């Protein structure tokens, strides 16, 4: 009666809290099955609690820092996970301790059925359920999203000048996006989080304007450093507007007071010292990497698990699903993939090579 457990697979044994895998109770359980709630951890001890689910690689915008002007890279429909496949994976992830889900893309609102998916996610008991959208379809969809149980929404807006917005997104959707922001502001999801990616020489003159917008509208204005994930491979260090510069410029005009943040949060958060409404968030993956506290993994629209935006490989959950894997098989595979999450990205290494998947094919 002596059973040996393979020494190289401790992370595949959900019942054995040993090796590098740690299982932590989240809350007391009750009920007939008394399952031990668990949390995913990687071999560096980081708790992986956040999942970004990309529901489509399609998009109605073609932002210069993201998607090519002339994309010919859409995947065939059968390559994209179907809703029941997404439902099943979501359930498995929740069973593994995922507590925060962000639905993204591509543009998530272009996929029909996204509200129903969000409703099913909310029924799985996900505490923090959010969406990232370019806002084009938001005004007409906000009521359904709220009814579906969405808790938060991030809207991308890279210029307050309609002509510049058109250059950046290669659309005429400025007014529609502004209506989308207004719709969020007058919904239970207020305050909206508005994300801008600043690119030197394009919209870096708008830092103060965006801060003023946050104050006037009482919303959260977040600045994300440009990362080497653009389809046209234009990224270079000189195009990155460092978060420290953004902070300095806003602080000079309207002094900022830092707000405490959770360790795993990507944004440094600030309020205005003069008591004005609104908040500023600075996300500095390039100049101040936060990999050490990263809690995120990503599921691409074509069913690949990615442990980092900058991963060289992705891990094929779609194939496993379609080959008839059981929930246990899926869980074990996810655990082993998460265990090997990269320690950090290497954007700042002299010989850094961007991943072959660009942002629109990963899910931001
Ligand atoms: N289409 C939606 C949108 O634009 O909000 C969701 C998907 S988009 C890929 C998610 C986020 O990634 C957006 O806030 C976008 O600005 C950001 N993003 C795209 N390319 C980026 C890049 N190269 N560097 C930094 N952020 C980027
Ligand atoms: Fe589309 Fe969002 Fe990428 Fe812009 S940032 S091209 S809206 S996916």
Image: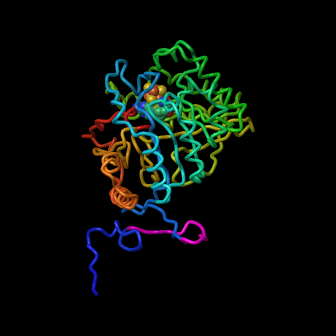
Residue at the spot 60% in from the left edge and 37% down from the top edge = 153
Residue at the spot 44% in from the left edge and 31% down from the top edge = 106
Left or right of residue 351, residue 225 in this image: right
Percent coordinates x, y for residue 40 in the rendering: 44, 61
Percent coordinates x, y for residue 199 in the rendering: 45, 26
Color scheme of the displayed model: rainbow
Percent coordinates x, y for residue 172 in the rendering: 53, 13
Please state the extent of the stretch shown in magenta in the rendering. 21-34
> Nearest the camera: 273 or 88?
88
Quadrant assignment, res 176: top right
Q: Is residue 197 visible?
A: no
Quadrant assignment, res 270: top right
Q: Is residue 147 visible?
A: yes
| Above or below, 200 relative to 296 | above
**Viewport quadrant of the N terminus:** bottom left
Left or right of residue 326, residue 165 in this image: right
Residue situated furthest bottom in the rendering: 1
Q: How many marks?
A: 0
Percent coordinates x, y for residue 315 in the rendering: 31, 48
Residue situated furthest front in the rendering: 324
Q: Main secondary structure of the magenta part?
A: loop
| Above or below, 25 relative to 200 | below
Residue at the spot 36% in from the left edge and 50% down from the top edge = 344
**Viewport quadrant of the C terminus:** top left
> Nearest the camera: 321 or 29?
321
Residue at the spot 37% in from the left edge and 60% down from the top edge = 335
Residue 31 among those drawn in magenta: yes
> Nearest the camera: 159 or 245?
159
């Amino acid at each position: 009666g002596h059973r040996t457990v393979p020494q190289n697979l401790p992370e595949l044994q959900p019942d054995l809290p040993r090796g590098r895998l740690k299982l932590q109770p989240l809350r007391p359980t009750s009920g007939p099955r008394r399952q031990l709630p668990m949390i995913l951890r990687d071999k560096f001890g980081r708790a992986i609690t956040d999942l970004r689910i990309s529901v489509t690689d399609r998009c109605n915008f073609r932002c210069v820092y993201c998607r090519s002007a002339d994309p010919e890279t859409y995947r065939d429909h059968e390559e994209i996970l179907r809703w029941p496949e997404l439902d099943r994976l979501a359930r498995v992830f929740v069973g593994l301790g995922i507590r925060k889900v962000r639905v993204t893309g591509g543009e998530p609102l272009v996929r029909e059925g996204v509200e129903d998916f969000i409703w099913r996610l909310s029924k799985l008991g996900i505490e923090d359920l959010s969406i990232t959208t370019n806002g084009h379809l938001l005004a007409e969809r906000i009521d359904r999203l709220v009814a579906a149980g969405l808790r938060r929404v991030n809207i991308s807006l890279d210029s307050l000048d309609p002509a510049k917005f058109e250059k950046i997104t290669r659309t005429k959707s400025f007014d529609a996006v502004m209506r989308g922001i207004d719709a969020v502001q007058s919904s239970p999801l207020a305050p909206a989080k508005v994300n801008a990616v600043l690119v030197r020489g394009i919209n870096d003159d708008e830092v103060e304007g965006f801060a003023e917008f946050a104050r006037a509208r009482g919303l959260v204005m977040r600045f994300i450093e440009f990362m080497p994930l653009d389809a046209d491979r234009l990224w270079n260090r000189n195009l990155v507007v460092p978060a420290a510069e953004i902070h300095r410029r806003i602080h000079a005009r309207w002094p900022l007071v830092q707000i405490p943040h959770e360790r795993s949060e990507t944004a440094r958060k600030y309020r205005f010292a003069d008591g004005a409404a609104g908040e500023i968030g600075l996300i500095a993956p390039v100049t101040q990497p936060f990999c050490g506290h990263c809690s995120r993994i990503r599921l691409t629209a074509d069913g690949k698990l990615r442990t980092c935006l900058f991963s060289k490989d992705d891990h094929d959950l779609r194939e496993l699903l379609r080959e008839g894997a059981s929930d246990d098989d899926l869980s074990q595979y996810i655990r082993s993939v998460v265990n090997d999450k990269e320690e950090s990205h290497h954007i700042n290494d002299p010989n850094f090579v961007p991943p072959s998947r660009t942002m629109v094919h990963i899910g931001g």
